[in-house]
Amino acid sequence: MTSNLTYAVFGNGSWATAIVKMLCENLDQVGWYIRNENTMDYIRNEQHNPSYLSSVEFDTSKLSLSSDINEVAQHFDVLIFAIPSAFLHAQVEQLTVDISQKTILSAVKGIVPEFGLLAGEYFHVRKQVPFEKIAVLAGPCHAEEVALERLSYLTVACIDKPTASAIAKRLSSHYIQTQTHDDVIGAEYAAMLKNIYAIAAGIAHGLGYGDNFQSVLMSNSIREMKRYIKKVYKMKRKINETVYLGDLLVTGYSTFSRNRMFGNMIGKGYTVKSAQMEMNMVAEGFYATQSAYQINFNHLKPAQTPIINAVHSILYGQKSPKTIFKKLANKLD
């Protein structure tokens, strides 16, 4: 029975910490894989994560903490991966237990760079997890607002509706509203692409562009997202739904958005390396930009993606943000 499944989270960043908090609202036990033993011991002794969302206090009697990824994977049914995409493969390859019959919930908002695959596709190809046992967790939802218990919204996408509903129920609370969806690939691509557009919004802000330009940029971003997702996975979808447009808007506009923050630093003149060193969190959009650009480039008939192309030129082509955005402004409508 899906209602009796046990849950574990893999990762110890802000999003992983927020997911553990959500699960603890409804479950008596939550597995938590934390690679760093010092971090794990700190949480066990001090009841909060020392590096991320440190204001969140945990009832540690509910937490089954372990630095052994195989132990956690073995003993829980629903495995929630909230590890940055750039580091996911290195962690998952340590798994020696069979997870092919586990339910996988991807909270990874990016492409696994070693394979050019969405996280869901990666688990299917590398770990033989059937697609009907793979779900995707999407927003709009910032970890920082979960910590503050501000009303937030989540979408659980899975082709198996009972699985999606069961997971959504476990994540719901007085401050978390959930819904389900069947567009797993579209939701996962949208969660990846919105980080790139948030970087673009940040670059624009750093360069001194105002709200008028930002509104045009976001309007063009959602249309570009629609073209891109339609090219890689064609199905009927309403791009103005919360799982697509809502997640894009909160990531593009919020002061909590690490991708917008990263872009803002680039717009102000930071190099990529210096911006990464300055930030204490991973900006998924940096890695997503290369993957999204390459996937689109490899298509026989690529989608028109002037915004992704502009961000790629700046981050990977070392082009001047000022020059690139002046050209981009003339392509938007």
Image (cartoon, helix red, strand yellow):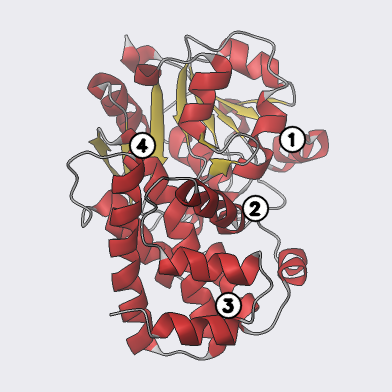
Q: Is residue 5 left or right of residue 112?
A: left
Please, what secondary structure does the residue beneath circle 1 have?
A: helix
Which kind of residue does numbered mark 4 sit on? Ile
Whether residue 59 is visible here, answered yes or no, is: yes
Q: Nearest the camera: 295 or 165?
A: 295
Please, what secondary structure does the residue beneath circle 2 have?
A: loop
- 47 in relation to 248, above or below: above
Q: Earlier in the sequence, mark 1 or mark 2?
A: 1
Contact (CB < 8 A) between labels 4 and 2?
A: no
Q: Nearest the camera: 263 or 141?
A: 263
Farthest residue to the front: give it. 300
* Residue 97: % across, % down: 65, 9
**Residue identifier under label 1:** 40
Q: Earlier in the sequence, mark 3 or mark 4?
A: 4
Q: Which mark is residue 52?
A: 2
Q: Which mark is residue 281?
A: none
Q: Which mark is residue 264?
A: 3
Which part of the image, by quadrant, shows the C terminus?
bottom left
- Estimate the spatial distance between the alpha carbons at disc 1 and disc 2, rounded to whole Å: 13 Å
Q: Is residue 218 left or right of residue 19?
A: left
Which part of the image, by quadrant, shows the N terminus?
top left
Please, what secondary structure does the residue beneath circle 4 have?
A: helix
* Residue 309: % across, % down: 50, 66
Q: Is residue 41 left or right of residue 317?
A: right
**Residue 112's quadrant in the figure?**
top right
